[in-house]
Image (cartoon, rainbow, N blue to C red):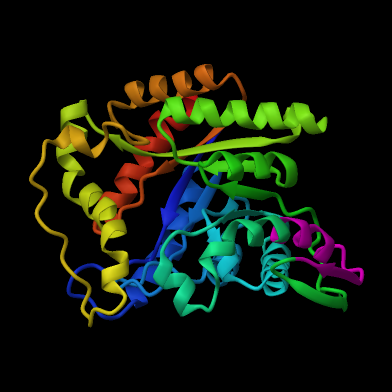
Amino acid sequence: MALGFGLLSAQLRPGETDWTRTYDETVRLAVEAEQLGFASVWTTEHHFVDDGYMPSLLVVGAALAQATSTIELGTGVILAPLHHPLRLAEDAATVQLLSHGRLLLGLGLGWNEIEFTGLGADARRRGAAMEEILQILPQAWTGEPFTHHGAVYDLPTLGIRPTPPSKIPVLVGGGAEPAVRRAARLADGLFVSSPVAKFVEQVHWVLDECGKIGRDPATFRFIHYSVLLAGSSRADALARYRDVTWAMQWKYSDMEASAIRPLPAATPPKFDRPDETLVNGRAAHAGTPAELVETLLDIRRQAGVPVEFVARSHFPLLAYDAQVELMQLLAESVAPHI
């Protein structure tokens, strides 16, 4: 039960206009994660954001595949309804080939209306689109001709090549009950960031759905990701990473507005609330490494299933050396104990 690291997003810092540094550092951080012994490294997708929040996860995945050799490469998550399923199948197969079987394909629905409008997708049919994509991908990866006629996608008979050299695990990211039950029926696992009580409920939905369809829950992966802030104390961890954590959280509320904003990327507003609000009620934890270990083990105990963990501890505004220092602390003092 090792620890993964992410979510790499290649975002600019305020005032920057050249993404060269962000993508160079994305590759370097993946290499660092592998050298530190993390089990997996994860990227994350959005579109049209002024700081360039990563839009092309499988392109980056191909680069990470060539820069690393053992670490699993997760997408957390590709917004599947924004992508044509056959192109998605081709690109995923290519990354699986380049990585020699290390891709974890996390897929999510998306929520930002401007992304759907900009890319010509229908947000109202995103659930139906995901249902069909999860049916199409396994057929596409056989390399044999197949046909799909659905409410969203009407595909001619054809074969998708190249074929991946090994099975590509498909994970579903999403906390709503229909998404979780869809994962139990059609996917290999769940990739979610939920407060513990909600996560326990999501696990129950998976187990219930597996019982209904006769699926062995042991074939299903539960991957929980949360912000992990490590320090000499809880107060120290919160104070040390206050501004970078706030910037990461704030950006989600700014995404739609930023799509039509000129460069450079906007500066986050000043954080003026108690530090505890950065973690309370969220999938976010701060404390000493020992306290973080106990928190994660308690999540696993409450869930009652073999939960894998990912530290969402990449912060775009954190200086590179400070980022590596946090990674090293998590790798050396948290990962070995979970």
x and y percentages locating residue 104 in the rendered image: 63, 52
Query: Does 59 appear in magenta?
Result: no
Image check: 124 left or right of 326?
right
Tell me the quarter of the picture where residue 139 sits.
bottom right
Q: Position of residue 287 (x, y in %)?
A: 27, 27
Q: In percent of the image, x 58 and y 29: which residue is there? A: 203
Q: Quadrant of residue 12?
A: bottom left
Q: Quadrant of residue 333?
A: top left
Q: Pick the quarter of the image with the N terminus.
A: top right
Task: Name the side, left or right, on which 242 lies relative to 18.
Answer: left
- Give the residue displayed 26% in from the left and 31% down from the top: 280
The residue under the point 81% across, 60% down is 165
Q: Residue at x 72, y 60 (%)?
A: 132
Is the residue 45 above or below the residue 298 in the image? below
- Please say whether residue 235 is visible from this viewpoint: yes
Q: Is residue 199 left or right of residue 328?
A: right
Q: Is residue 1 visible?
A: no
What stretch of residues is rendered in magenta? Answer: 133-150
Counting from the top left corner in percent of width and height, residue 319 is at 24, 57
Seen from the viewer's position, the closer of residues 95 and 194 is 194
Compared across the picture, whether 256 is left or right of 217 comes to: left
Q: Is residue 303 above or below residue 238?
A: above
Q: Is residue 145 magenta?
A: yes
